[in-house]
């Protein structure tokens, strides 16, 4: 098992450019710890093949890889256009109509949302293709709406439609999402990202779905990309297991100039609540075509790390780009360069419990002693997440006998998960095994100080109740 020098985790989307055994292994060696499976693209057969390759790479390299299933969600899209595209001229009018009423008439554009005439209001703006085209509603009819083009261009079939000022009547999970998730659970995914979250009921719907299928341990990540999610941010963070700052749609729905400060706000809130947060979208976009990023992209990645993000994510760069391995290496090198100079703000604990108090105390000990490792045995990952949220100087090694948790913890900042087999019901035996494992893997030597974070009795759920400063024998 290789321990990377950087603490920030790297999420990489696996696609046609990266779904070979050689490329996946190279990406893991370069620093990828979470593999994103984007269910907006690819067949179940494609994803099953990718999962097989990832699990084989994880076993062969003795390295945990968390599998993140990213559900497509209820995205409104343009329907099928004649010849696959149409030109929208600035100042011209066109009619937006439900795709089931559309018969290839000129000056009409179909969409797959039938309720728009009931909800639309004159003056509201509609965005197409990630905001590249824009139109304003000038008339609402029973069967369609008339729009005037504000920012024109070529509109292609199946491009996305955003209407930021309307809370559209869309389910949090579509039938496709449910079928995809059934498949994902059969493949053993570790994390599920829910797209276009608006309120906590969206999270509860997904968690109930998982509970009904005996998959409550699968962690739920909320993708923040809607204005409604920002309005309900605190309660969403409290209800889920992690957050993805999905800057693409967020920048369309709320204007790009608002995204930087929202990113900082979301990351800070996640740090305080002790849940992992991923910063996503266009981090190294130019590396889809080029072997090096722009200086602005490198600064963007660095600033997300400075903000305190647990992970940075590659999308097209690793899924369809020419340099998937180089893109992972670049994220790793930026993190390795930036992290030593960081002084994270020590946020107050989110709750007054023994576990929160101990992880708060961990920070003080870490600053006084030259610790080689902070070590914890965990059955849920709860304490480890809180410890990581303190952003200690010493790296965290998290021991578990739960194979699923072993992979899931690969998302958490600064954590090196380790799987151990055999009994762990005795505290003395557990400490001996922690010491032996670190020595056998050449991760610590005699005289090194290890701060052990744990609970007695050992297997008690969320039962962390002691810190022990242990010197390697």
Image: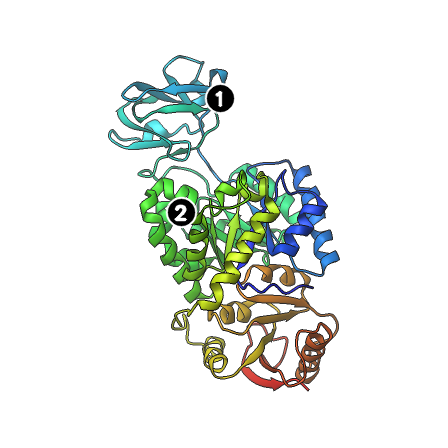
Q: Secondary structure at mark 1?
A: loop
Q: Quadrant of the N terminus?
A: bottom right
Residue 275 visible? The answer is no
Q: Is residue 118 above or below residue 290?
A: above
Mark 2 Cα shell of 10 Å, populated few (<14), some (14-19), many (≥20): many
**Image position, residue 84 (x, y; %):** 49, 20
Q: Earlier in the sequence, mark 1 or mark 2?
A: 1
Seen from the viewer's position, the closer of residues 460 and 368 is 368
Q: Is residue 146 above or below residue 21?
A: above
Numbered disc total: 2
Q: How far apart are the alpha carbons under marks 1 and 2? A: 28 Å
Color style of the picture: rainbow
Q: Secondary structure at mark 2?
A: loop
Residue at position x 35%, y 35% from top? Answer: 163
The circle drawn on residue 467 is none
Seen from the viewer's position, the closer of residues 350 and 149 is 149
Task: Give the side of residue 126 with respect to residue 156, left or right.
Answer: left
**Image position, residue 128 (x, y; %):** 39, 30
Seen from the viewer's position, the closer of residues 31 and 280 is 31
The circle drawn on residue 80 is 1
Mark 1 Cα shell of 10 Å, populated few (<14), some (14-19), many (≥20): some
Q: Is residue 340 above or below residue 64?
A: below
What residue is pinned by disc 2? 198
Q: Quadrant of the C terminus?
A: bottom right
Residue 306 visible? The answer is yes
Task: Give the side of residue 24 with respect to residue 328, left or right.
Answer: right
Residue at position x 70%, y 74% from top? Answer: 442
**Image position, residue 179 (x, y; %):** 60, 40
């Amino acid at each position: 098992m290789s321990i990377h020098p950087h603490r920030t985790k790297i999420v990489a989307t696996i696609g046609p450019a990266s779904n070979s055994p050689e490329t996946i292994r190279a990406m893991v060696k370069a620093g990828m710890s979470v593999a994103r499976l984007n269910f907006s693209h690819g067949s179940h057969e494609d994803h099953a093949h990718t999962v097989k390759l990832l699990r084989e790479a994880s076993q062969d390299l003795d390295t945990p890889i968390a599998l993140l299933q990213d559900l497509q969600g209820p995205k409104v899209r343009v329907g099928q256009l004649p010849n696959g595209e149409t030109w929208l001229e600035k100042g011209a009018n066109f009619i937006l109509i439900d795709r089931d009423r559309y018969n290839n008439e000129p000056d009409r554009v179909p969409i797959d949302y039938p309720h728009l005439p009931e909800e639309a209001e004159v003056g509201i703006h509609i965005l197409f293709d990630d905001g590249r085209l824009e139109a304003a509603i000038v008339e609402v009819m029973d069967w369609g709406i008339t729009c005037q083009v504000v920012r024109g261009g070529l509109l292609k079939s199946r491009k996305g439609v955003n209407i930021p000022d309307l809370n559209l009547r869309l389910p949090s999970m579509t039938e496709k999402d449910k079928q995809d998730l059934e498949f994902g659970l059969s493949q053993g995914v570790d994390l599920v990202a829910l797209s276009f979250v608006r309120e906590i009921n969206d999270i509860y719907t997904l968690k109930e779905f998982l509970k009904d299928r005996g998959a409550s341990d699968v962690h739920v990540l909320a993708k923040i990309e809607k204005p409604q999610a920002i309005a309900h941010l605190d309660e969403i963070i409290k209800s889920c297991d992690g957050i993805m700052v999905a800057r693409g749609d967020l920048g369309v729905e709320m204007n790009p100039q608002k995204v930087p400060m929202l990113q900082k706000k979301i990351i800070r809130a996640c740090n305080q609540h002790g849940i992992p947060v991923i910063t996503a979208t266009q981090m190294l976009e130019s590396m889809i075509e080029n072997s090096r990023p722009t200086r602005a992209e490198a600064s963007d990645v660095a600033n997300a790390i400075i903000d305190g993000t647990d992970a940075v994510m590659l999308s097209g760069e690793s899924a369809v780009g020419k340099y998937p391995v180089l893109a992972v290496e670049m994220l790793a090198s930026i993190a390795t360069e930036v992290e030593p100079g960081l002084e994270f703000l020590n946020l107050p604990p989110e709750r007054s419990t023994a576990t929160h108090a101990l992880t708060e105390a961990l920070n003080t000990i870490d600053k006084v002693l030259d610790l080689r490792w902070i070590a914890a045995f965990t059955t849920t990952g709860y304490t480890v997440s809180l410890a990581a949220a303190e952003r200690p100087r010493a790296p965290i090694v998290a021991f578990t006998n739960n194979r699923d948790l072993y992979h899931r913890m690969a998302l958490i900042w600064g954590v090196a998960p380790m799987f151990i087999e055999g009994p762990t019901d005795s505290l003395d035996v557990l400490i001996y095994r922690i010491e032996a494992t670190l020595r056998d893997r050449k991760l610590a030597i005699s005289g090194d100080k290890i701060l052990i974070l744990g609970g007695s009795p050992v297997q008690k759920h969320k039962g962390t109740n002691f810190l022990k400063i242990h010197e390697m024998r």
